[in-house]
Amino acid sequence: MRKIPQYAALLAYMVFLAFPLVWLLSTALKTPQEMAGLDPTWIPADPTLANFSDAFGEQDLIGAGLRSLIVALASSALTVAVALPASYALARYQGVLKRVALGWVLVSQVFPFILIIIPLFMVLRQLDLVNTLLGLIVVHVTFTLPFALWMLQGYVRSVPRELEEAASVDGATRLRAIISVVAPLLAPGVVATLLFSFISSWNEFLFALVVLKDPDVMTLPLTLVRFTGPEGVSRLGPLAAASLMATIPSLIFFAIIQRRLRSGLMAGAVKG
Amino acid sequence: MTATATKPAPPARHARGRQRPRHNREMWVLMLPALVPVVLFSVGPLLYGIGLAFTDAEAGRNHETTFVGLANFVDLLGDDDFWSSMRIGLIWSVTVTVLQFLASLGLALLLNQKLFLRGLARVLAVVPWAMPPVVIGLMWRLVYHPDAGIVNSTLGTDINWLADFSWALPAIIVMGIWSGMPQTTVVLLAGLQNVPKELYEAGAMDGAGTWRKFWSITLPQLRPIIVTITSLDFVWNVNQFSLVYVLTQGGPGGQTRLPMLFAYEEAFRYGFFGYAAALGVSIVIVVLALLGVYLWRQLREAS
């Protein structure tokens, strides 16, 4: 009984957190007739999945989804491939380079995007990479790289150095020790970093907006924004449906890492 | 983890002088694949971008760029749009950061207790984190929609929230709080779980009540985490672009034109690269100054 105020507060939080989501879902399930009516209601009178199939017909949503997939897969694979050796170096060796690299990870978080995106746009224009997926992949790799480095070097550090040393006492070369001892233990960290980079790229909007001008090469977030257009209500249903579908990859990702988010990962990250 | 920590340090097997140079070379080789793209596409552009702030660079390919010194900054100081954008940006960042922190602290305290439904609330609390910013923006457009939105029909009002001069900024602030709560809550919750239980037991023995424990144990213990997360939130909020671009595009009449939106427009709508870069540099200066004062005060109070 003493906990009634707590439950009231928790309920208020849950309402605040959930109501936009419920509204999105509700809008996605409404018929155009109901959307046009006055007095919108929480629960659709005549729930329909037609909006989801309509969404596919509009604005080349499938093409945009595929392009997003290509960009996200390529940039996450590249990010991890490039970050992996460097993160090993950061975790295992000391030196000036290490301090500079870790300092850069912090600095890159503080500086506004505009200072990087203008020169980057000029570079991409010189290389004729504006309006191409390759250009966007390059941009995504560079902007995910600092955080991916940070994540991976944390995972490398959690692999005890003694294991490697034991392997080299047994006569393994350093490379051999890394491949057969460190790599298997690092696999979960690599997967987590891959997923993180994939989602960053999948969700990214500002760089895509600057790099991709032509509707034929636009990624999913850009296509979704173009969807809205004028303030008519008839297309809100398909828009809501498309938005829900665009969220699915990130939801899967968060379902996977949810447990770690709550306990280990964050606690470790905060303590440094 | 603990087993390895308690072992004595392994004796150095190599002479130091022999090991160092080889290690350094290995480190460079391993770092190279990451260094090249970072320097080429991140460090380089950043320095170049800062340099652009002192030129009259424009988007047109045929434009001849010349060094103009501080002219862009002088122009900025005389630009009413700049001042109004900075004012809106500060109101937005400070309000969102403070309210986000208070709301998240309350939620984290609740989630740290043994309450029924806690699991569901925890899932709900991270959902905004899992959503693409564009989808969050579009979702809130539906929420605020004058005809088909839930806010008007619930409150019985007839306001076009996102197009109203006095309501647009509060409306995007509510969205900002909603979308940033997960990170802050998760970090604060992790901090709460790391507060040693013995402190509360000792507090209880001294007869401290709930409030007293919160003020004298929880808050001081959380302090480093609070300072870190509020600083990060502040920087993220100042740099916010996508959410607000999708929701209002800076309108109505520039009432929600955050500094990043202003800079984006100057650079990619009007093509004034140099001017936009100067804007970026000014934002960095303001942010670093504010953060510096904040961190300095926190450090002084802590010691």
Image: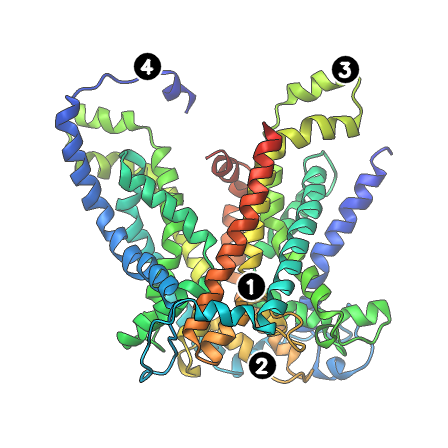
The crowd level at tag 2 (other Cα within 10 Å; few <14, some 14-19, many 20+) is: some
- Residue B243 sits in quarter: bottom right
Find disc 4 in the rendering and name its residue: B8
The crowd level at tag 4 (other Cα within 10 Å; few <14, some 14-19, many 20+) is: few
Residue under mark 1: which chain is it in?
B
Marks 3/1 same chain: yes
Q: Residue at 61% of width from left, 67% of height from top?
A: B83
- Residue B118 sits in quarter: top right
Q: Secondary structure at mark 2?
A: helix
Find disc 3 in the rendering and name its residue: B206
- Residue A26 sits in quarter: bottom right
Find disc 2 in the rendering and name its residue: A54
Q: Is residue B46 above or below residue A224?
A: above
N-terminal of the pair, mark 3 or mark 4, is 4
Residue A166: x and y, percent? 23, 24
- Residue B133: mark: 1
Q: How is the image coloured?
A: rainbow
Q: Nearer the viewer, residue A243 or A53?
A: A243
Q: Is residue B259 left or right of residue B213?
A: left
